[in-house]
Image (spheres, coloured by chain):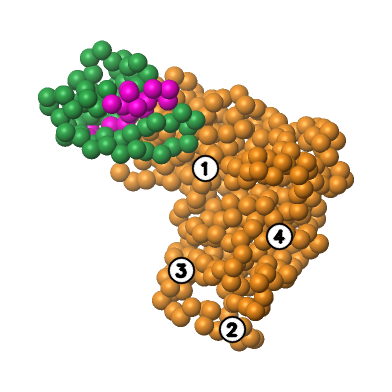
Chain colours: A orange, B green
Amino acid sequence: MSLIYMNNAATSWPKPPCVAQAVEKALIELPGAMHRGGVEDFDVFAAVRKKLAPKLGVADPDRIALGCNATWALNAALFGFPLQKGDAVIATCAEHNSVIRPLHVLETQKGIRVVYVDTDRSGRVPLENWHQALHEHRPRLAVFTHASNVTGAVNDAAALAQAAKRSGAAVLMDASQTLGWMQVDAERWGVDMVAFTGHKYLLGPQGTGGLWVREGIQLSPHLVGGTGIHSDKDTMPEDMPLRLEAGTGNEPSCHGLLAALIWAEENPMDRAACNARLERLKRGLAEAGAAVICPEGPCTPVVSFNVPGYSPEDVGFMLTDSYGIVCRTGLHCAPKVFEGLGVPATVRLSLSRFTTEDEVDEAVRAVRDIVG
Amino acid sequence: MKFECKKTENCFADAQTYEYRLPISGEAFSRFLSGWEVRVNAKLRRPVFLADKNGVHVKGLLAHNVIRASFPQSRWEAEKAAFETWLGGIDA
């Protein structure tokens, strides 16, 4: 049975063939660290930063620290930001556990007040809720996901960031679900830190990700260790990105990410066609009898739904085991968003630029069969 | 009947789900489910069965020898032990 992969919001697949080739080549060749810099040295980390900067909408690539995933980046931001006991942090109910769990540690171990702002039936945070929380709690830090990983609803990042800035908060945005799918414009929007991963819509390998930090925001390194420079000092360097990059980097995977970034530049995504397939899937599922969450406005290629009479887990089982359609079921590591959605859990199908219309139609047919 | 068991991971709030590899197909296994509420969906590409009893939920493909059982969180250990005792006692 052939597989139809619709779990791209977790990890994108397939990757462009050049990604695996670049990883393999990097593993076969001598490691880059045998050189110590210089004009003729190829620094894959610097090359990745340079390619990422325009996608993030930032001017200085050296403000991008590279790490192993978005969770690493969010931990670096949340534990590194200079919060004091009694300070407030606000976040949206659409956050992933990679935000919720670090915030729980800050709340229980450091006396930080954590406030979650309700999201609506689409998984988006209404601006009035956000404004009210900012006014009421005067947070030092405001955290929001650019898009819900459960519903695909994209938040108005500029409006959320600017409102937070006006109230005196620094802004951390989780772009795990958007970077590579849509343009991020961090500096123009007024965001101070952006966490991202390489293995979703950037089409890179697992084990890549990073954190952009605006100049003027000084994070205390959450992870400390060797940097290859200033080895005589007991403390991490002050300069970005090394300040946040302790230890040997994931060089082979960064070669893969670089290959993906170059490939994406050379092969621009047909956004209209991708959105048409997304809408075809939503419409088809609804016509088949599924209860589909259909946010208005901009969305990532994610569809959450339920089938009356079956648990999401059973629907996921039937899709995967009976039809070979790889999906995700349950809470999707974002448990707080479900109260606003009004359902306990969902089945999630997430597309990529490689998903075909035939695959969409096959998923609709499968759900139609399940509905009966 | 002998079987292999392995926990499966998912992110449901109350997940206690295990897979069992059986020496018989799901279709043959489903014949032993007297007293269970059994639903067979034969229209699917690979037909499935779903069965419920006392909060224990079992499902599988009719043509495959791996089934999946979910146990109620509040008493999952006792229900799992009882299920496995029953499973082991099936004379297949």
How packed mark 2 is, by other alpha carbons closer than 10 Å (few <14, some 14-19, many 20 or more), is: few
Q: Which residues are magenta?
A: B63-81
* Among the two numbered marks 3 and 1 on one chain, the one whose residue lies closer to the N terminus: 3
Q: Position of residue A212 (x, y in %)?
A: 69, 60
Quadrant in the rendering for residue A249: bottom right
Marks 3 and 2, how far apart in space?
21 Å
Dot 3 and dot 4 within a common chain: yes
Q: Cβ–Cβ below 8 Å for labels 4 and 1?
A: no
Q: Which quadrant of the figure contains the N terminus of chain A?
A: top left
What's the amino acid at mark 2? Arg
Give the side of residue A359 with respect to residue A237, left or right: left
Marks 3 and 4, how far apart in space?
32 Å
Q: What residue did someone put label 1 on?
A: A350
Q: What residue did someone put label 4 on?
A: A220
Dot 3 and dot 1 within a common chain: yes
- Mark 2 chain: A
Q: Which quadrant of the figure contains the C terminus of chain A?
A: top left
- Mark 1 chain: A
Secondary structure under tag 2 reads loop
> A116 above or below A102?
above
Secondary structure under tag 1 reads strand
